[in-house]
Image (cartoon, grey):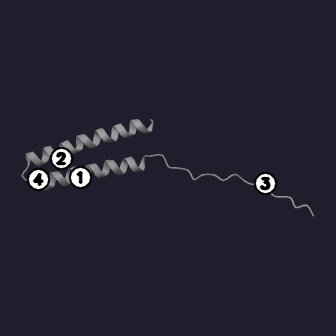
C-alpha cells in the first residue's frame, strides 16, 4: 500500500468520524461530549497515520579511502 492510499484512507476515516461526532452533538444534549468524542477519534487517526508512516533512514556516509603519505 503506497502512501497516497494511506492518506486517502486516513482522510476518509477522519471525515466520517467527525461527522459521527457532529451527529452525536445534534442528537444528545451533551454537546461537549460529542465534540470531545470526535476530537478523540481524530487524534487516534492522526496518531495512527503518524505511526504507520515509513521511517526515514539516516543518510549513509560513504567510507573514504585512507590517504597514503609519501615520505
Is disc 1 in contact with disc 2, using a CB cutoff of under 8 Å?
Answer: yes
- Image coords of residue 66 (percent x, y): 80, 57
Q: Which one is in front, 54 or 59?
A: 59
Identified at 41% across, 37% down, the residue is: 4
Q: Residues within 10 Å of mark 3 (few under 14, many from 20)?
A: few
Image location (x, y in percent) of residue 40: 25, 53
Which residue is tagged 4? 31
Instruction: Residue under label 1, please give it.
Output: 39
Label 3 and label 1: CA atoms lie apart by 55 Å
- In this picture, residue 15 sits left or right of residue 32: right
Assign the N terminus to one quadrant of the image: top left
Mark 1 Cα shell of 10 Å, populated few (<14), some (14-19), many (≥20): some
Nearer the observer, 71 or 3: 71
Report the Cα–Cα distance between label 4 and label 2.
9 Å
Q: Disc 4 vs disc 3: which is toward the camera?
A: 3
**2 left or right of 64?**
left
Quote the CA–CA distance across marks 1 and 2: 8 Å
Residue under numbered circle 2: 21
Nearest to N terminus: mark 3 or mark 1 = 1
Marks 4/1: CA–CA distance: 13 Å
Q: Residue at x 79, y 54 (%)?
A: 65
Q: Secondary structure at mark 2?
A: helix
Q: Is residue 57 left or right of residue 21?
A: right
Could you give the CA–CA distance between mark 4 and mark 3, rounded to whole angstroms?
A: 68 Å
Identify the residue at image location x=72%, y=53%: 63
Disc 3: which residue = 65
Q: Position of residue 57 (x, y in %)?
A: 56, 50
Under circle 1, the secondary element is: helix
Amino acid at each position: 500500500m503506497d502512501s497516497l492510499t494511506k492518506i486517502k484512507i486516513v482522510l476518509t476515516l477522519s471525515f466520517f468520524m467527525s461527522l459521527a461526532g457532529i451527529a452525536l452533538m445534534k442528537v444528545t444534549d451533551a454537546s461537549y461530549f460529542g465534540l470531545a468524542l470526535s476530537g478523540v477519534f481524530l487524534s487516534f487517526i492522526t496518531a495512527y497515520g503518524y505511526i504507520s508512516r515509513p521511517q526515514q533512514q539516516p543518510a549513509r556516509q560513504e567510507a573514504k579511502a585512507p590517504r597514503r603519505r609519501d615520505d
